[in-house]
Image (spheres, grey):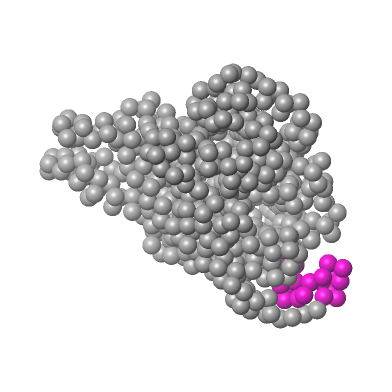
Amino acid sequence: MYYKSGTYRFFYALILAFLALLSIMCVLPMIHVLAVSLSGQAPASGNLVTFWPKEFTLDAYRETIGNDNFIHSFGNSVVRAIVGVSLCMLITIISAYPLSKEVRVFRRKNVYMWLLVITMLFSGGLVPSYIVMQKLHLLNTIWALVLPSAVSVWNILLMLNFFRAIPKDLEEAALIDGAGQIRTLVFVYVPVSLPAISTLSLFTLVFHWNSWFDGMIYMKDQKWPLATLLQMIIVQVDFSKLVTNMRDLADISDRTVKASQILIGAFPVLIVYPFLQRYFVKGVMIGAVKE
Amino acid sequence: MEKKRSSKTQLIFHTMMIPAVVLIVLFSYLPMLGLVMAFQDYKPWLGFTQSEWVGLKHFKYIFERDDGIQVIMNTFIISGMKIIAQNSFPLFFALLLNEVRKMAFKRFVQTLVYLPHFLSWVIFSGILIDILSVNGLVNQFLVQVFHMKPIPFFSDGTTYRYMVVATDVWKEFGFATIVYLAALSGVNPDLYEAAEIDGAARLKQTWHITLPAIMPVVIVLLTLSLGNILNANFDQIFNTYSPLVYDKGDIIDTFVYRVALISGEFSFGTAIGMFKSVVGLVLIVTCYRLAYKLANYRIF
């Protein structure tokens, strides 16, 4: 066998080392930020912290959690995520069901299919979307954040592929027993598809939690979701630091706090990640490669 | 009876489609109608009906302005480099990962490399700005260990372009390997066994069996990413650029945002956006056709 040869063993060891190095590099920056967030202000601003906290303290987290704006935005994001995910999943399921039928069963299916796919290929762009939002009086309401993404064509495609793979016998049995289409969907299709539904829900959840641009253009600061607030306080302000060696006081006290804000902002994603990981390989595959 | 039942079913199906249709009409198709403003001098207080029609003035203006041509060039350059990097590195990584026989190690690597994909660009650039700033972790390392001058990663145009590609690879390469790994697991093991008997070394097996076997997948991914060449990633650029790097790093999407929402040139901004959408549409349709022809790929 090839893997018994000496040369291969040498290269195998090399490969393992390389892979380990790369994977650690993917999380090292986060570990650094974690270390900074847990350090005292002096070592953090003096750039003395690498991957282990110095002068361990939770002050930064205390300050972040004590910040009303931050907590308020966190709440906005939670509401947005709950409403957004429920709405999106509801629409995904009820539109994927008829679309999973064959043309013989649902005659106008392809019309709807094209209506949906066209929105994936072409869009009106920034200004017209903003004007529509304005004319509908949705600016500065949660609906501006959840309605446009409620129809996710990608989710619908994945869901209908999953529905298609469900054995026809199940559906026929339900229909013969006198259940209507809606009952068949609710009591046969949905329970059978729970793995797919939970995967797509998690993906949608991450999408909503991470979305910041819509919050920035459609909402006023009191209603910003957390991602938008973070964009403002972490990214926009921080460019001064890239250019000069500015080390004023504000900058110094900021660094640990910003690190803690970054981590709290990423926290929900890190929590759902293990669950997500269990499914997403499958989820990605349904749409990506078909035999 | 059969006929009646069927038409009732049709009605139920149509009803189920109503919410989705209403929403896409409002939030996708209405904005498309709004594109008429690209042919007007749109003034918010005049609206679509009263604003003056100017024909293709704004479209011509894109190519008369220096920054208009510049952002189109930047988009192609940044996106082109990303396409090359994002189609070669994940493939290389997947080939190496495929060699690993210890499942626990493989899963450990996968867990770590997929993670950055799920963080938003806001969070990710918050981290990047911290570690790549002039006195950040990376520069500190370069200065202390290699006695180099600190590199202005995000404030010099040329460096910025490479950084955009490098950080994009850093965030997304793991996730991009998933498709390749799946393709690799589909390669017929008999082929390797036969090659083994013929005395082919592992590298030769990779070259003559593995690569040809997954070529269709590579071609599909490459063509599909070519279709998206005008999307150089707004989220990433917007969260990492600054006026210092506008000349080399500004892309169509960020330009549209600044022109339309910051400077208030609504019609001009919409015209560039529309230019991008139309060219993008042609590219995507062409590339999907190509992917279908080359590798029999369809999305539905």
Left or right side of B237 for B204: left
Would residue A61 appear left or right of A288 to someone viewing this image?
right
As drawn, A235 above or below A55: below
Nearest the camera: A250 or B230?
A: A250
Please determine whether, in this image, residue A142 is positioned above or below residue A279: below
Quadrant of res A129: bottom right
Q: Position of residue A291 (x, y in %)?
A: 41, 49
Of residue B1 and residue B14, the one placed in the foreground of this image is B14
Residue furthest toward the left?
A: B198
The residue positioned 62% from the left and 60% from the top of the image is B253
Q: Residue furthest top?
A: A56
Quadrant (top left/top right/bottom left/bottom right) for the N terminus of chain A: top left
Residue B21: % across, % down: 72, 56
Assign the magenta stretch its main secondary structure.
Answer: helix
Observer able to see residue B155: yes
Image spot of residue B186 (x, y percent): 34, 43
Q: Is residue B78 magenta?
A: no
Residue B281 in sight here: no
Residue placed at 71% from the left, 81% from the top? B55
Is residue B43 located in the magenta-colored stretch of the structure?
yes
State the image quarter where residue A40 is shown.
top right
Count of numbered tags: 0
Residue visible at 73% across and 47% down in the picture:
A215
Which sits in the foreground, B246 or A216? B246
Q: Position of residue B209 (x, y in %)?
A: 24, 48
Q: For residue A272, what is the image quadrant?
A: top right
Q: Which residue does the image show at 73% across and 63% down from the upper left?
A: B263
The part of the chain drawn in magenta is: B31-51
